[in-house]
Amino acid sequence: MRIDLHAHSAASDGTDAPAEVVRAAARAGLDVVALTDHDTTSGWDEAAATARRLGIALVPGMEISCQAGGISVHLLSYLHDPSDEALLAETTRTRDDRVGRARRMVERIAEDHPLTWDDVAGQVTDGATVGRPHIADALVARGVVASRDEAFAGILDSRSPYYVRHYAPGAADAVRLVRAAGGVPVMAHPRAGRRGRVVDDEVIAGLADAGLAGLEVDHRDHLPEERVALRALARDLGLLVTGASDYHGTGKLNGIGEHTTSPAVLEAIEATATGTRVVRQ
Ligand code: AMP
Ligand code: FE
Ligand code: FE
Ligand code: ZN
């Protein structure tokens, strides 16, 4: 059994349609894939239909943008109720604020580079969660940079003068909201320090107290020694350990299925969730 619990579609900042993410997972020989777009579940139905057709299992999920003490935290939610009003209120607020934030970043970037809001809007699939990757794609289209990666290494870096923050709920609140919606909260790439500051072990312990279920340990952005430390932390805190690709189509090097989660951990996630079910056949 090969299980990849973290993938993005064009419903947020991936480049593949939801159906194409599922097809890519099947082509890669995966048995299970989770669709975890940023702050939205709008890709679930399309992904589920394709999963049924191809005979691959789909774990409906989402990656919630949060913060702890101003430090960005990404929280994966698996199998929550997509119509839960309290959780929807938070993700709607985040998604709305992401638009104004992207506009403000474009205003700042436009002082130095050829870029308009229309350029960025043209890169966003209708209704998708807007993010910096869409600004990156517009900069690539304008020939300012060659790739998303180059954009993030400079203009879009969180320490760049063009960077603007967006609203995001507190991570402990998000953990509680996911649980209340019947979902299973797992912290995404807890030590991915290349993207900006990361929270320390005490913050993660606090999230465990709030109901966090697991840590995503096997992820491309973690060094071997960071994975060792995270496994030990998960053991100390009684948390599950997952691994996943964080696939974004052609938007990132991450290949679907490059890291995986054990069947026992998926079973534990499924046994805990009450919001929605894994899609099988
Ligand atoms: P935002 O949520 O709008 O602040 O943008 C963050 C998103 O950008 C993350 O979800 C990543 O998927 C993406 N990202 C971060 N670094 C890179 C990179 N070097 N190349 C491509 N995408 C990236
Ligand atoms: Fe992303
Ligand atoms: Fe993330
Ligand atoms: Zn992700």
Image: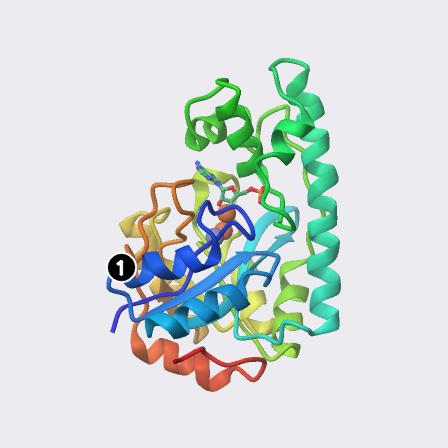
Q: Is residue 57 visible?
A: no
Q: What x and y, as percent, mark residue 55? A: 33, 74
The answer to whether 40 appears left or right of 187 in the picture is: right
Q: Amino acid at mark 1?
A: Arg
For image coordinates 27% across by 69% down, the residue present is 2
| Above or below for 243 versus 252 | below
User: The C terminus lies in which quarter of the figure?
Assistant: bottom left
Query: What percent of the width, then of the height, locates residue 277?
Result: 50, 81
Q: Nearer the viewer, residue 163 or 58?
A: 58
What percent of the width, then of the height, locates residue 14? 47, 47
Looking at the picture, tell me which residue is in the foreground, 138 or 275.
Answer: 138
Q: Quadrant of the N terminus?
A: bottom left
Q: How is the protein colored in the picture?
A: rainbow
* Mark 1 Cα-neighbour bin, 10 Å: few <14, some 14–19, many ≥20: few
Q: Residue at coordinates 54% horizontally, 62% vertically from top-left?
A: 62
Does residue 143 lie above or below 168 as drawn? above
Does residue 76 appear left or right of residue 114 in this picture? left
Q: Secondary structure beneath disc 1?
A: helix
Q: How many marks?
A: 1
Question: Can I make out residue 23 in this image?
Answer: yes
Q: Compared with residue 59, is residue 150 higher up or lower down, i.e. above or below?
A: above
- Residue beneath disc 1: 27
**Side of 43 relative to 231 (left or right):** right
Confirm or reject: label 1 Cβ below 8 Å from ligand 4.
no
Q: Which residue, as the protein is rendered here, is positioned at the far front?
A: 53
